Amino acid sequence: MSEVVLYDYWRSSASYRVRIALNLAGISYEAHKVDLLAKEHKSAAHLDLHPQGLVPVLKIDGHSFTQSLAILDYLDQTRELGLLPTNASKRAKIMAMAHTLAVDVHPVCNLGVVQHVSELVGENNTSVKEGWMKHFILPGLCAFERQLKEFDLSPFVDGNSPGLAEICLIPQLYNADRWKVDYSNCHKLKGLAASCESLKAFQDAHPDQVNV
């Protein structure tokens, strides 16, 4: 077994973030697939790994970590990825951008929440889910676009290398595309995404690449 193991679901935004970071760090890992649709994340074995019954879980350096942002921080601290700048004000602003998507948008758009909403309204169909997703994702992306106005994007938020903001953006755009969210007016955001998508670390982390 590989020294590094990622308990992963291919469409999980949180797992997607961690895959990107592992790739940026050049860390090889064994992917252990957790099928959320089959509720494997609620099994006793998985709950031993993640008390919340979520993904991802990363086993690395003899430790087991949960929560994607905490995992990203650990990788940043131990592998010197430079995901956040040292300048305090810029660091806080970039962290806020990441939180706009990972803390405010993602939690209300994850599988468990949307499924529960569908059950409450008694309409477990695509149109209800799509409407819910559009209601929350688009305002989050528009806010992210406005936050980008403070940065030069040369080509990334903090210069020549992608960081925490980009790692949180790309998985959310995957969800936006999946649920037909029209963010065509977010020009800076789209340019930033194009810069990220040109990198192999992002390409290899894409759900279509890992769901094989």
Image (tube, rainbow, N blue to C red):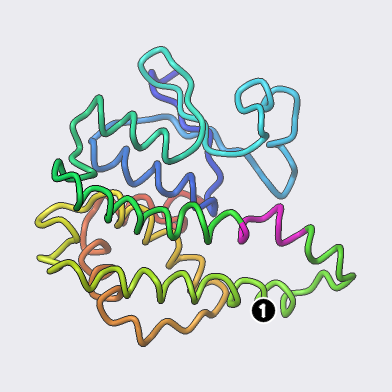
Q: Residue furthest top?
A: 62
Q: Amino acid at mark 1?
A: Gly
Q: Magenta segment: does it hold 111?
A: yes
Dot 1, crowdedness within 10 Å: few (<14), some or many (≥20)? few
Q: Is residue 166 left or right of residue 114?
A: left
| Magenta: main secondary structure | helix
Q: Which x, y percent locates residue 109? A: 61, 61
Q: Is residue 73 left or right of residue 137?
A: left
Residue placed at 61% from the left, 23% from the top? 49
Residue placed at 30% from the left, 68% from the top? 147
Q: Is residue 51 above or below residue 116?
A: above
**Closer to us: 40 or 90:** 90
Question: Label 1 belongs to which residue?
Answer: 131
Q: Is residue 61 above or below residue 193?
A: above
Q: Which x, y percent locates residue 56? A: 52, 37
Highlighted magenta segment, given as a residue range: 108-115
**Closer to us: 69 or 23:** 69
**Closer to us: 39 or 168:** 168
Q: Which x, y percent locates residue 212? A: 50, 50
User: Helix, strand or loop at disc 1?
Assistant: helix
Q: Give the quadrant of the N terminus.
A: top left
Q: Magenta segment: does it hold 31?
A: no
Q: Is residue 125 left or right of residue 81?
A: right
Q: Is residue 40 above or below residue 131?
A: above
Q: Is residue 167 above or below residue 83?
A: below
Q: Quadrant of residue 121?
A: bottom right
Q: Quadrant of residue 5?
A: top left
